[in-house]
Image (cartoon, coloured by chain):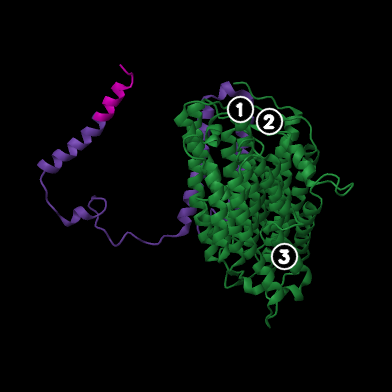
Chain colours: A purple, B green
Amino acid sequence: MNPYVPLLAVLVVAFLLPVLLLAISSVAGPKRDEREKGDPYECGVPQPDNPHHRFPIKYYLVAVLFLLFDVEAVFLYPWAVVYRDLGVFGLIEMSIFLGMLLIGLIYIWKRGALEWD
Amino acid sequence: MKPPVITPEIVQAILPFVILALGATAITMTGIWKSKRGALLSLIVLLISAWKLGPLVEGGPTITWAGAIVADRLSMLLSAVLVCSGLLTVLIARPVLRRENNDRPEFYGLLLFSLSGMLLIVSTTNLLVIFLALELLSLPLYILCGYNREDARGGEAALKYFLLGSFSSAIFLYGTALLFGATGTIDLAAMVEGDRLLSITGALLVLSGFLFKVGAVPFHMWAPDVYDGAPTPVTSFMATSVKVACFGVLLRLFALAGEAGGPFALLMRGENMGNVLWWIAVLTMTVGNISALTQSNIKRMLAFSSIAHAGYIFLGLIPGSGSVDVRGVLYYLIAYVFMTTGAFAVVAALSSRDRGREVTGVERYAGLGFRRPYLGLAMTVFMISLAGIPPTAGFFGKYLLFSSALDRGLTPLVVIAVLNSALSVYYYLRPVVVFYMRDTDRPVQVDDSITLKLAVFIGVVCVLWGGFAPDLGSLPGVPTILGWVEASAAALP
């Protein structure tokens, strides 16, 4: 037998199960339509107004900078795990990588990208 | 894990790239105190890089570093062409940015970053390094397209280029993954034919990524809007350097495939899928030329013309009954860089901004041939060269490509290419007609800065030099472009 047949079986079950659950709840479940149900996040807080606001571009900047340094952390972690195996070579490579990011940080800092106003 | 051995030869081979990358970082940092010396600094960095590159272009053994770095004569010649193109771009950019009161060192920093990516992409056979270099060359370009923040069309160009460029990078990466799955390696030189379906799909996806970057049909939709919306120096850089870098990679890729087989050889032989490259070449040149016919904006016209030229270059990449025409493609790329950069330099000298929008309509050139005879003559030379009329480099480029394609048994393709060339004469000569046969009472505004004149002058000299001395011995003592090109072609299998 093909070794992938169990995998196929899992795939089929994984596909059918949610379909089945959704079908049962839509057929058997009670339906009460209320206004609050249409609001975003049914958490009890009344919605003040329309969510489609224009928001300051600064948030975008923060998001991009966050992403950058987040990726740095993603690379740091596996390096820390195999630090002993990589030895001095890994340390030098990582220093180059961090040095480049540090230069970038100095640049955005000095250019005032981190100031909110 | 054992670190790779770093030999002095490897250091020497990647030094031009390292100098550019470090220089780009340093120049960007001078933006902190809003330095006005970005152009000067970048010229110095480019010249140092060229100085370190010089001895390598002249030859020496091929240096490889586990496939990640391949420094042979081909990669060094392409690097030299790219550095030249960077120098010309800086010469064009400085007066334009000064004029628009927008001269920041970041512009030159980004330019050099992009250029360092191009140097890297032409000197590797490792698909992951190619991807890395592709991103390094693309990301700064996305920013440079939207450099003028007052210009809404620049922003549109940047966004379009960024979105479509990201898609093409993702497609390229997907292709790389499939090729790795099919062959078990990401080194192009070591790739052998693996699973057939997977290989062909992967090779097609990788090829699509590059077709996007060079603006070949059917991946050309972005080119006119982006080239039109970006600042003229950036357009010039995109239209020339990006093409040189990406065609450099394609050249190496197909030459290696011709020698060793592998997934790309399957694609080139085209047994069960029609000849993909054949159709790309035909469509690219025909669509480019026919679209260029109706353009009255000279920047847009040059954008479509660059699509058409990509189509001609594809002629050299189709093996036919022989192998890939390395010599013809290299010569054409060099000729193309100088004629296109020169034409864009003239456009930059004549353009102006009206409420943030760049005005480059062809009617602005009325009467220029009499009022500014030298500038008019230079533009005429570039247009004649782009149209492929002797005695210019553009003519010899086409001659080499077409005659070699005939030898390889691609007669129908050459007939289509020649018809296309004839068609292109119409729109290339239109600016010349406006120059010499129409006049207006409006005063002609021309940028008279010395660096623009220098860029135009270098362009004219190189276009005519390539045209008058294409072969060894035609002018004793004068080095010929073809001589370098042939020596580089010999470096490939």
Image position of B360 with respect to B184: above or below:
below
Tell which of B463 and B116 is nearer to you: B463
Marks 2 & 1, CB-CB < 8 Å contact: yes
Q: Which of the labelled discs sits on residue B379, or is there none?
A: 3
Tell which of A53 and B319 is nearer to you: B319
Q: Who's the residue at 22% across and 33% down the image?
A: A16
Question: Judging from the image, what secondary structure is the residue with disc 1 in?
Answer: helix
Image position of B454 with respect to B181: above or below:
below
According to the image, label 2 marks what residue? B493
- Looking at marks 3 and 1 on the same chain, the residue that comes earlier in the sequence is marked by 1
For the N terminus of chain A, the image quarter is top left
Tell which of B97 and B403 is nearer to you: B403
Answer with the quarter of the image where residue B294 lies: bottom right
Q: Who's the residue at 54% across and 29% down the image?
A: A79
Disc 3 residue type (three-letter): Met
Label 3 CA crowd tier, 10 Å (few <14, some 14–19, many 20+): many
